[in-house]
Image (cartoon, rainbow, N blue to C red):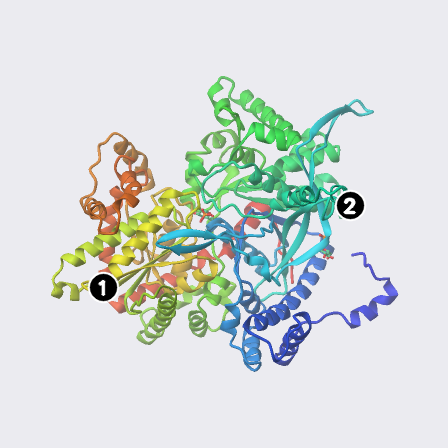
Amino acid sequence: IESSIPAPLRDTWKKFAATEFKEKEAFQKEVVKHIETTLARSLYNCDELAAYSGVALAFRDRLIIDWNKTQQAHTLLDQKRVYYLSLEFLMGRTLDNAMLNQQMKDTAVDGISELGFRMEDLIDQEHDAALGNGGLGRLAACFLDSLASLNFPAWGYGLRYRYGIFKQEIIDGYQVEVPDYWLDFNPWEFPRHDITVDIMFYGHVRKYTEEDGRTSHVWEGGEVVQALAYDVPIPGYGTPTTNNLRLWSSKPSTGEFDFQKFNSGDYESSVRDQQRAETISAVLYPNDNIDVGKELRLKQQYFWVAASLYDIVRRFKKSGRAWSDFPEQVAIQLNDTHPTLAIVELQRILIDKEQLDWDDAWNIVTQTFGYTNHTVLPEALEKWSVPLVQNLLPRHLQIIYEINLYFLQTVERRFPKDRDLLRRVSIIEESNPQVIRMAYLAIIGSKKVNGVAELHSDLIKSTIFKDFVTIFGPDKFTNVTNGVTPRRWLHQANPKLSALIAEKLGGYQFLKDLTLLNGLEKWADDKDFQREWMDIKYSNKQRLAKYIKETTGIAVNPHALFDIQVKRIHEYKRQQMNIFGVISRYLALKKMTKAERAKQVQRVSIFGGKAAPGYWMAKTIIRLITAVSEVVNNDIDVGDLLKVVFIEDYNVSKAEFLCPASDLSEHISTAGTEASGTSNMKFVLNGGLIIGTCDGANIEITREIGEDRIFLFGHLAEDVEDLRHAHRYGKTEMDPALREVCDEIQKGTFGDPGIFGGLIHALTDGGDYYLVSDDFASYLATHKLVDEAFKDPQSWANKCIMSVSAMGFFTSDRAIQEYAENIWNLEPVPM
Ligand code: GFP
Ligand code: GFP
């Protein structure tokens, strides 16, 4: 690599090059130095936030030293890199993860206690980086951890939202959204004021003829906004590899103000221009599985994609290679359709700027991209209105038309008589106005398309993308079942369990090779081991009980069965079925005699999750949960037999203490609707059992851990169409237990029934699209089996241990290895 320092002077530089602290005293020295200088605090005014900041800065220094080395090594080696484009990276907190991945936590815990602080308290000072809605964003974060841990040369590219997903407050039982000011203090990012890209919007396309007679296009005029890079170091576990997550922030390209306007007294308008530019990276859209089609969202997408591609192309050009080498050096993965414009942008760069022929350019493009689909829900599939794109990105629209034209021509040649096929697969949907089907564009422009669990990957081939399987053949479509990083989701979230496992397996190697967990099998029946295992579960439940008491005032008994459902609130995930089940349990308890009640298993039903602000049904579900909790928790007949808790503002750091505290967790989506799910993996990995439908990754979890260790219920994906059809034609009677629940709600037991009318309507005249009634009997029956199983602690413990021992497959390391081999053709960098 070219150095900015002349060769003879480099020795002086190297003599003073930054080094990493390796033991306690060096760590303490760093912390005190940062507190006293960087933060300008002292021995006399260092509170927990300042102490957290000092520790974070000490670790940040350590990360950036490794980051520098890694980036230099990767640049020098010039191997193929993968770029993971995701509009969401739900990172959560960083400090604990950085300490653990760098294997310095013990040193730091010890060191900080000698300075007067407890590490848990400091970790709690950190604000979550909540740059994501749910599963899709958290998957991206797990993938970054695995890419670095496996030494793959990889960068993530995303947006640096000034506000992450909103904070949820529960006021009078309703969700209220509050802005998330997460950037108040963020030591984990490095602004790169020297790395900026001008991004253009609007304007027009001018066509002209080159000297050699070819037609060229320039896109000119329009608004220009600047993208500024912020780099976030991503440490691997137990390796010096530290990859980069580059997040773009928007600002006005003319500098802070338009000085002409400012000087002419038009102060307000110059500030407005600045705000307009900054708005692009201001907010993360809080929508899950719904396409909203807002212009600002499209602007975000193009802004991020254009800045990232500019950066990727610039880096490639530094190597001096021929364009034909591009796909050998660069793989770009599209996390959902949000970055699909990258396909069009690369084609534009190659033909308009680099003057390649259309076909040569298109060959490069289609060898470079991979597309991951995360949903089959039709309302979630992105479509952009043609007039909107015409106005915002006129040149891109032309290119999309051309891509479509060539594509349809090849389809027509192969299937000459099938007019309807052409209509069905066209990138342009002939609606009013016309819309661009982003998923189709992503498929046509990618080398490989994958789903995120086996069932889901089969479903996309047989439903939404069926025609494309006919056209491209089945090999273009593949599956990579999701995974989660065991570093965060076992070692960090559940340190006691991780330590117990390490003790039995002779070390922490399982964190790098999760299949080693199968070594636990031989202790599954060992009484002492079972006791230690369940003691850890109990202490995790105690910690949660304490949190619940402190935050909600509800006292729950840690000996009760903790039944948890935490995820975004969505009708397809069926939190409504869960709360109806709770009501049914409540009604049953009320009918029992004292003697009968004494035989019942105690339950704590715990819910958590955010509803999209505009998703009224989801908000009503939250309202019902809080209403039921008020009634049930205050009913002296019921006492500890049933408690209902709604945890406010569910996020990554809360998931970290919820997952280790479950006896049972719920993954109960209507079959065929949840592409994979990843919290199912986290809960089982932490020694909890699950109740679930035959959906998403539940199916593969069952295959790995065995049918008798999971509580499956409900109809299969293949039944769904017929069942819905029957509802539509009024051929279904509501399940009697569900009827009783609805009656109780309508009687006003949980407050004004008018509030919940929508929920009841969805089950009746609404056609019960999510098949709550069809699955309800089997759901309740399966909960009875759970209660029975819980009464036998030894067999329960055995099930938990055996399940954990079989979870090796669900590490995100395995998923990343599959992507590297089957999609990216990517080699790790030897360390
Ligand atoms: C990257 C990093 C730089 C680093 C170089 C070489 O640059 O900080 O100096 O690699 O190690 F960002 P680009 O590949 O982005 O040019
Ligand atoms: C989506 C799907 C989930 C899947 C994740 C990750 O999650 O089934 O596990 O992506 O692939 F719906 P959300 O972003 O919708 O939570």
Quadrant for residue 562, please give it: bottom left
Q: Residues within 10 Å of mark 2 (few under 14, many from 20)?
A: few
Q: Nearer the viewer, residue 779 or 397?
A: 397
Rendered-image quadrant of the N terminus:
bottom right
Report if the CB atoms under discs 1 and 2 are less than 8 Å apart.
no
Residue 821 can be seen in this image: yes
Q: Residue at x 38, y 55 (%)?
A: 171
Q: For mark 2, what is the residue? A: 320
Q: Quadrant of the C terminus?
A: bottom right
User: How many numbered discs?
Assistant: 2
Q: Which quadrant holds residue 758?
A: top left
Precedes in sequence: disc 1 or disc 2: 2
Q: Position of residue 33 (x, y in %)?
A: 67, 75
> Which dot marks residue 641?
1
- What amino acid is labelled 1 in the image? Leu
**Foreground of the two, 485 or 54:** 54
Secondary structure under the numbered disc 1 in the rendered image: helix
Query: Disc 2 on helix, strand or loop?
Result: loop
- Which of the two residues, 180 or 765, is positioned nearer the viewer here? 180
Residue 413 drawn at (x, y percent): 56, 20
Q: Residues within 10 Å of mark 1 (few under 14, many from 20)?
A: many
CA gap, disc 1 to disc 2?
70 Å
Q: Is residue 797 above or below residue 307?
A: below
The x, y position of residue 343, in whole percent, is 62, 37
Marks 1, 2: nearer the viewer:
1
Instruction: Tell whether circle 2 marks a residue whose Cβ is less than 8 angstroms from ligand 1.
Output: no
Amino acid carrying mark 2 in the image: Gly
Which image quadrant is residue 540 in? bottom left
Residue at the far top in the pictured view: 417
> Residue 455 at x, y = what percent?
40, 43
* Residue at the outermost right position: 8
